[in-house]
Amino acid sequence: MLLNKKLDVLTENPRAFANESIMNLAKIAGIAFDKSQIVRGEATENISLRAQVDENITPKMALEQLLKFREAQTTDGD
């Protein structure tokens, strides 16, 4: 209810809207989107639940896997 009132002020007052940062508006939009997905049972991807992580992995092995993932992402992005 309070968020709606605040957004109404921004909508109705051009000066208040102009003084509000795009970052704050983006944060609000992102949080609202994420929460709406949770309510619908479509929560954003949770890596710890979807990934199959070996409980006995060493820090060195974990770092190697991260570097491989980073390399693959960098290669795909080029």
Image (spheres, grey):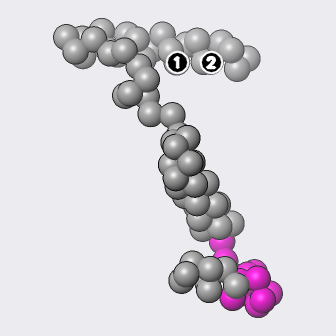
**32 lies above or below 2:** above
Q: Main secondary structure of the magenta part?
A: helix
Q: Is residue 43 magenta?
A: no
Give the residue displayed 58% in from the left and 60% down from the top. 32
Out of 40 and 53, give the one closest to the viewer: 40
Residue at 76% in and 82% down: 11
- Mark 1 packing: few (<14 Cα in 10 Å), some, or many (20+)? few
Left or right of 41, for residue 15: right
Q: Which quarter shows the N terminus? A: bottom right
Q: Are marks 1 and 2 in contact (CB under 8 Å)?
A: yes
Percent coordinates x, y for residue 49 in the rendering: 38, 27
Residue behind mark 1:
70
Residue 14 x/y as whole percent = 80, 87
Question: Viewer-proximal residue, 37 or 32?
Answer: 37
**Place of residue 45 in the rendered image (x, y in percent of width and height, measured from the top left):** 51, 34
Where residue 56 sits: x, y (%)?
19, 11
Q: Is residue 10 magenta?
A: yes
Mark drawn on residue 74: 2
Q: How many marks?
A: 2
On the question of residue 66 being in view, the answer is yes
Label 2 residue SS: helix
Q: Foreground: 9 or 64? A: 9
Q: Amino acid at mark 2?
A: Thr
Compute the Cα span from label 1 to label 2: 6 Å
Magenta stretch: give its range: 9-21
Mark 2, Cα crowd under 10 Å, few <14 / some 14-19 / many 20+, is: few
The answer to whether 36 is drawn above or below residue 53 in the figure is below
Name the kind of residue labelled 1 in the image.
Arg
